[in-house]
Image (cartoon, coloured by chain):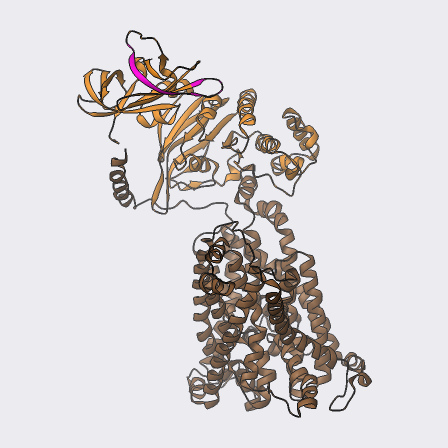
Chain colours: A brown, B orange
């Protein structure tokens, strides 16, 4: 029979080619096609309208509501001849790549130590390592200012010993170092999941042939997680281009600008809002980030392919570090944790409770609650706290509801609407929160029907939903996909329409996942600061954006108190997320 | 009464045709088995009937209602087809109790709560599950889950019950029991059932009518005895039963009677190839293992062979026979000593097919 094996295969092939002209597909009835199209259409509108408005504004000679506004390339001409723009562009590029050069090796090392070795206290470390990711970067940056800034607590202490401060964080290298350290969790997240999927027998095989731990890591582990490392690098370059908090706090005092702070500074530069110039820079930023997002998407597909080769249930045996190894490994992680968690958060915690400090001042004598007392007297600050909590707790829940509706619209969906959804979700990732906030601010000015909503929290909420869209939808889709298709099909054959199936089977099964997603979205909304910069007004203040505007006035006492409140709220959110079993490692 | 008519159903998947025109009918109070190797399209055909897959061409009528018509581009969703489907994995909803799982179909059909209670309890009692009504699926054994899945698909009295490999997740002993009571249940309730299986003994024991599928086509259909003892192709002959496949050359041919042989042996056989065979052609013969009788005494009309070994199988012995390039297995009640034996094969049990893949 083996002699015949070749011939039929060839025959089948030509037969398949002949049969390629197959009839048109049958329409899918009862698949909630209308619902899917409406939801995806609305989402497309919510994402495309602001972006479209930015592009439109960039081609006008004045603000879009001004009667003097005409089509023209004046704004592009101004920006492209402005030396500051090119300086900001170059700084952004250096900043992003420098950040990657620090975050990727360190994140990879932490991932290796925590997933592949028998390091002590693994379970606690897994959570601690992610902490910087959950704190807003403006809070972190402020934390560094008060601890290691020119007059920070640690700087003063060191100066007391050495007579000078050997560092300056208000510089590009300082910014890069701090941003690099605080983006380590983003690298850790992807690389550690790739490392978990590696079958450890490959490493063991290398060990038995006499390679040392470090040789194995270099020759076996590293090449196999390379796709994940490349993906993490691409992600961090994107985050670098979008970052706002760190350059604003650390770069601005010395006039170091990146693209986002350049947009922000354009307003103060001219005294009046120059919308067309801001729009041009936003368009440039999108033109840089969109290809990055698209590239990431391709990379992620490849990474998944690569990881799938490891096979399921790969047994992970850990490398033994030995006593000295443990000490070295724990010191590395401990030092990183000290620099990127303890320094900023500790600084804020101290700063929030003191009023005056300096050389020769004993901090214990200065302990005071006055920062908080004074805060309660300012109505905008109190409202800011209430609004932030409202937006994250209630708004977070509503956002999960919206993401669920979108997730269902894309759940086991085929055809054009699914492709549209795929691309729509990519777009917000290419937009920095500052730009999304600005764009929605314009949308609410531009569309008469929406104008009454602008001074309400609804405007912030809608912008936040778009900011959190790709993260939130990925969370929801990850949960929905875990419902076995037969569970849905059996409801259909029992007589339930697709809507009933979602209501009675899919949603009840994913409910625990929804609770976890809610907690995580809550943290995302809590730490958001850039989106509200333009969008918030009197009555709709939020903590993060308040801090941005207070920075201009130099009200450090208030910022310190707000930072501490933000950290405490985030901590509570994180505790809730862990309690609800959220998968923070996804 | 004909409950299900499937005619000329064709389906493509990414340029590959996976159903190439399947047609069959099924009656009330009978079981039709779709039997085939994996990849033969049997599950796809079942899912087309259920409405979970959409074929491009064909017509399906369930209980007098057209649910699929390729020409009119009509394809009703599963919930409008009035069917019950039992999944291979049972697909019980983990967040609902047994009672809620079974009662869901009735609830969807607007049956009153009191009626639902009564009917659910009745069918659970019938299946011996009455005491488990308030448990969750994860608290049940595999066999119990399977019976709950059948209850859930039956309780609202669908026109057609579809079973997708319902026994494959049970252990061997449970499986034999289950195929008996499933058959009894379906005949008692007088419903129309379609059973997908790759297990020939399941199809033979449970079905009234077997459709044998190969590569998206129904290659043979008939009653269990018909399909077992009267195969129309090499594929059918080989798929069912335990077989010896013998490569040989046709020596002489006389109508249906043929003599085949090889290196130092020859056998009388019957031509089963639909297109007939010619002398001197290469051929394959299928001989069911149970058709060969082996004796240590010479007998008239038997073939002298060498017994290499007798293997003990518990309830019987298996003989490993050889003569030239003719190698065969046979069964018997006692151990024979290795060496010369005589094998008797009735000519009507030596099914001769062409060697080529026509």
Q: Position of residue A44 (x, y in %)?
A: 50, 64
**Residue at figure coordinates x 25%, y 28% from the top left:** B355
The magenta-colored residue range is B301-317
B306 magenta-colored: yes
Query: Total marks drawn?
Result: 0
Which residue is at the front of the view, B82 or A513?
A: A513
Q: Position of residue A80 (x, y in %)?
A: 43, 86
Can residue B83 be seen? no
Task: Say which quadrant the C terminus of chain B sits in.
Answer: top left
Q: Position of residue B21 (x, y in %)?
A: 35, 34
**Residue at figure coordinates x 49%, y 71% from the top left:** A430
Which residue is at the front of the view, A24 or A353?
A: A353
Magenta segment, prevailing SS (helix, strand or loop): strand
Can residue A176 be seen? yes
Look at the picture and state if A115 lies above or below A537.
above
Look at the picture and state if A139 lies above or below A462.
below
Q: Left or right: A335 with respect to A294?
A: right
Look at the picture and state if A340 lies above or below A199.
below
Which quadrant of the figure has residue A184? bottom right
**Residue at figure coordinates x 47%, y 41% from the top left:** B52
């Amino acid at each position: 029979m083996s002699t015949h094996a070749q011939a039929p295969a060839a025959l089948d092939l030509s037969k398949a080619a002949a049969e390629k002209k197959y009839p048109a597909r049958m329409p899918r009835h009862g698949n909630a096609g209308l619902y899917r199209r409406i939801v995806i259409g609305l989402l497309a509108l919510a994402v495309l309208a602001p972006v479209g408005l930015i592009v439109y504004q960039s081609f006008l000679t004045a603000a879009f509501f001004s009667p003097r506004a005409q089509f023209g390339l004046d704004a592009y001409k101004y920006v492209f001849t402005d030396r500051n723009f090119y300086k900001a562009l170059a700084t952004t590029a250096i900043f992003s790549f420098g950040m990657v050069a620090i975050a990727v090796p360190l994140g990879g090392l932490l991932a290796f130590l925590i997933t592949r070795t028998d390091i002590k206290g693994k379970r606690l470390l897994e959570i601690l390592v992610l902490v910087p990711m959950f704190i807003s970067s403006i809070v972190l940056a402020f934390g560094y200012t008060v601890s290691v800034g020119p007059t920070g607590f640690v700087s003063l202490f060191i100066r007391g010993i050495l007579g000078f401060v050997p560092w300056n964080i208000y510089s590009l290298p300082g910014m890069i170092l701090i941003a690099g350290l605080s983006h380590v969790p983003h690298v850790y997240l992807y690389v550690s999941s790739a490392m978990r999927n590696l079958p450890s027998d490959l490493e063991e095989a290398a060990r038995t042939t006499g390679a040392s731990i470090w040789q194995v890591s270099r020759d076996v582990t590293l090449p196999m997680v390379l796709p994940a490392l490349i993906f993490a690098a691409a992600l961090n370059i994107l985050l670098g281009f979008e970052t706002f908090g760190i350059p604003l706090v650390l770069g601005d005092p010395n006039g170091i600008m990146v693209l986002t702070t350049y947009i922000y500074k354009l307003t103060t530069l001219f005294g009046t809002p120059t919308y067309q110039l801001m729009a041009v820079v936003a368009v440039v930023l999108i033109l840089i980030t969109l290809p990055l997002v698209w590239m990431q998407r391709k990379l992620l597909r490849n990474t998944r392919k690569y990881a799938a080769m490891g096979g399921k249930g790969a047994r992970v045996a850990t490398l033994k570090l030995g006593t000295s190894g443990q000490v070295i490994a724990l010191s590395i992680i401990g030092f990183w944790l000290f620099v990127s968690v303890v320094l900023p958060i500790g600084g804020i915690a101290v700063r929030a409770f003191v009023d005056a400090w300096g050389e020769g001042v004993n901090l214990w004598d200065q302990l005071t609650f006055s920062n908080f007392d004074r805060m309660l007297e300012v109505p905008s600050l109190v409202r800011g706290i209430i609004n932030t909590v409202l937006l994250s707790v209630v708004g977070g829940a509503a956002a999960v509801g919206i993401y669920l509706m979108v997730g269902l619209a894309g759940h086991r969906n085929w055809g054009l609407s699914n492709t549209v959804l795929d691309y729509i979700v990519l777009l917000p990732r290419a937009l920095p929160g500052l730009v999304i906030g600005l764009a929605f601010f314009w949308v609410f000015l531009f569309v008469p029907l929406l104008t009454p909503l602008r001074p309400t929290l609804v405007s912030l909420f809608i912008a936040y939903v778009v900011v959190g869209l790709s993260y939130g939808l990925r969370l929801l889709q990850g949960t929905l996909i875990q419902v076995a298709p037969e569970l849905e099909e059996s409801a259909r054959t029992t007589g339930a329409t697709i809507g009933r199936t979602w209501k009675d089977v899919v949603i009840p099964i994913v409910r625990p996942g929804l609770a976890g997603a809610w907690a995580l979205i809550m943290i995302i909304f809590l730490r958001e600061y850039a989106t509200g910069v333009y969008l918030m007004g009197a009555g709709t203040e939020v903590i993060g954006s308040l801090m941005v505007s207070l920075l201009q006035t130099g009200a450090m006492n208030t910022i310190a108190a707000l930072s501490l409140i933000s950290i405490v709220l985030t901590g509570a959110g994180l505790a809730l997320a862990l309690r609800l079993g959220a998968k923070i490692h996804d | 009464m004909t409950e299900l008519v499937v005619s000329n159903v064709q389906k493509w998947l990414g340029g590959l045709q996976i159903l190439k025109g399947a047609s069959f009918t099924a009656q009330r109070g009978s079981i039709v088995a779709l039997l085939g190797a994996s990849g033969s399209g049997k599950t796809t055909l079942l899912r087309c009937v259920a409405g979970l897959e959409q074929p491009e061409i064909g017509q399906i009528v369930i209980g007098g209602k057209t649910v699929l018509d390729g020409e009119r581009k009509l394809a009703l969703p599963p919930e409008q087809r009035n069917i019950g489907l039992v999944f291979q994995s049972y697909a019980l909803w983990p967040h609902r109790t047994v009672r809620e799982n079974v009662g869901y179909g009735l609830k969807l059909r607007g049956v009153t709560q009191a009626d639902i209670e009564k009917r659910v309890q009745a069918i659970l009692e019938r299946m011996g599950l009455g005491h488990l009504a308030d448990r969750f699926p994860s608290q049940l054994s595999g066999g119990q889950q399977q019976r709950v899945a059948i209850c859930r698909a039956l309780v609202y009295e669908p026109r057609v019950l579809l079973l997708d490999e319902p026994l494959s997740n049970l252990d061997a002993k449970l499986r034999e029991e289950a195929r008996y009571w499933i058959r009894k249940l379906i005949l008692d309730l007088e419903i129309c059932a379609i059973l997908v299986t790759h297990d020939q003994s399941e199809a033979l024991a449970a079905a009234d009518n077997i459709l044998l599928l190969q590569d998206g086509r129904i290659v043979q259909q008939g009653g269990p005895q018909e399909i077992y003892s009267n195969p129309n192709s090499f594929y059918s002959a080989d798929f069912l039963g335990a077989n010896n496949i013998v490569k040989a050359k046709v020596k002489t041919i006389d109508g249906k009677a043929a003599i085949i042989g090889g290196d130092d042996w020859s056998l009388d056989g019957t031509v089963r190839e639909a297109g007939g065979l010619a002398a001197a052609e290469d051929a394959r013969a299928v001989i069911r293992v149970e058709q060969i009788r082996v004796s240590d005494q010479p007998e008239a009309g038997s073939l002298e062979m060498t017994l290499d070994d007798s293997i003990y199988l518990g309830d019987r012995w298996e003989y490993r026979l050889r003569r030239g390039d003719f190698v065969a297995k046979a069964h018997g009640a006692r151990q024979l000593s290795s060496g010369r034996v005589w094998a008797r094969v009735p000519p009507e049990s030596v099914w001769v097919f062409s060697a080529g893949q026509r």
